Image (cartoon, rainbow, N blue to C red):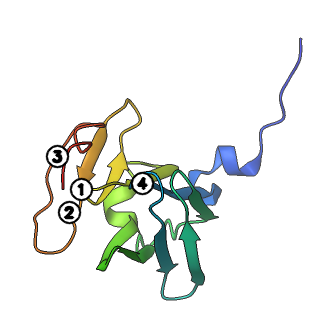
Amino acid sequence: MIRRKKTLGSLLPMLRKTHVRLTNLLGEGSNLTIHCKSKDDDLGVHVLPFKGSFEWSFKPNFFVKNTLFFCNIQWQGKSMYFNSYDEERDLDGCGKYCYWDVTLKGPCLLKHEGGYDFCSDWPNKKSVGIKQGDDKNMP
């Protein structure tokens, strides 16, 4: 019988890392500029080609539940800020893996079972729930 050694991180959820990823799905030839940070960490400016991703990981503040990462994203003269990880919202929502697709609709948080949990539209539009792929024909 093979026994797997349990790590301290698997035994104590407060010690496990959370992974956040943003992927550019704006279309062929469309670059996405992102700048993500928290109050303690500036992750720098990154330019993502179509289907390119940027990912980082961290250990949330389990006891206080105040970990927040926000990103400025820019594409074709549009710019917006959104919370890419909000511990209050995401600890029980996306949990350990918070993956975002940045689409023509805006940044959309992926559900683990497929589709999107929600999308934050580009400026001057409200957040809506849409399914993965529904944004293909949007302006």
Horizontal side of 45 relative to 66 (left or right) equals right
* Residue ranking furthest to the right: 1
Q: Between marks 4 and 2, how big is the CA–CA gap?
A: 13 Å
Q: Is residue 92 above or below residue 84?
A: above
Observer able to see residue 60: yes
Which residue is under mark 4? 100
Q: Nearer the viewer, residue 45 or 96?
A: 45
Q: Between marks 4 and 3, how big is the CA–CA gap?
A: 14 Å
Q: Between marks 3 and 1, how big is the CA–CA gap?
A: 11 Å
Q: Between marks 2 and 3, how big is the CA–CA gap?
A: 10 Å
Q: Earlier in the sequence, mark 3 or mark 1?
A: 1
Q: Earlier in the sequence, mark 2 or mark 3?
A: 2
Asked if labels 1 and 3 touch by Cβ distance under 8 angstroms, the answer is no
Which residue is under mark 1? 105
Mark 4 belongs to which amino acid? Trp
Which residue is under mark 3? 129
> Looking at the rendering, in which quadrant would you find the N terminus?
top right
> Looking at the rendering, in which quadrant would you find the C terminus?
bottom left
Task: Assess disc 1: are there few (<14), some (14-19) or many (≥20) residues with their C-alpha within 10 Å of its C-alpha.
Answer: many
